[in-house]
Image (cartoon, helix red, strand yellow):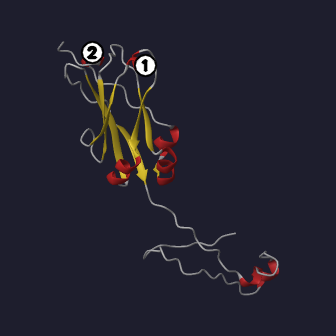
Amino acid sequence: DKTAPNSGNPGLELAFADEVLIEVTDDYLVANAGVPARVPRWSDMRTEDVARFYWGEFPDVDLAGTLVIERAHVEGAPIDFIFDEAFVHASGTGQRFASYSLTDRAGVVGPFSAPVTLNVSLAKLPDLPRPLVPLAEADGLVDLEDVRRTLTVSIQLIADAAPGDEIFPFW
């Protein structure tokens, strides 16, 4: 056998949850222990075919893991892979590419799938302290009478603030 899986053609793009296609956040990574992906089925799938998954700043470079096709997959079970949370964190923030390639049990390697472009944003927003509005302390409201006087908003020190960070109070 000298023909790679999928008749030697590139596989279809990996399928991701809609939320992932918008943005991969730290909260999403933690909730899902990584980034789940589904491999579209191919017509000549065989047990012991191997899917190799790639994730990184450049397409098809950084191997994230492998999945060996089992009988259940051939019989219709979904082909799911999770890009590990630690691997995604180590890859960093910004535009990342996810793809895969298929290899048969004879070792014939097929071409890479088209990469899926994902936006990874791993910044955690700090828990901000409650602002102090002295004129609102009595009733919890800022009313017209308060606004006609000098209204001050005090914000406690934010330990995780970085130079250039801005805070915009609004109500």
Q: Is residue 77 above or below residue 162?
A: above
The amino acid on which the numbered mark 2 sits, given as a three-letter code, is Ser
First in sequence: mark 1 or mark 2? 2
Residue 63 x/y as whole percent: 27, 40
Identify the disc placed on residue 7.
Answer: 2
Quick one: which residue is furthest to the bottom in this view? 150
Q: Find residue 94 and name its label.
A: none
Left or right placement of residue 70 versus residue 157 in this view: left
> Are the residues at dot 1 and dot 2 in contact (C-beta closer than 8 Å)?
no
Tell me what residue is drawn at x 23 percent, y 19 percent. 4
The quarter in which the C terminus is drawn is bottom right
Q: Which of 150 and 69 is in front in this view?
A: 69
Q: Looking at the rendering, which quadrant does residue 36 occupy? A: top left
| Residue 48 place in picture, x, y as percent | 30, 21
Q: For the N terminus, which image quadrant?
A: top left
Q: Where is residue 39 in the image (x, y as percent from the top left)?
A: 40, 28
Q: What element carries label 2?
A: helix
Question: Up-down: is 109 above or below 44?
Answer: below
Pointer 1 residue: 72
Q: Say few, some or many: other residues with alpha carbon within 10 Å of mark 1 (under 14 / 14 to 19 / 20 or more).
A: few
The residue at the point 76 percent across, 83 percent down is: 135
- Determine whether the residue tagged by mark 1 lies in a helix, strand or loop: helix
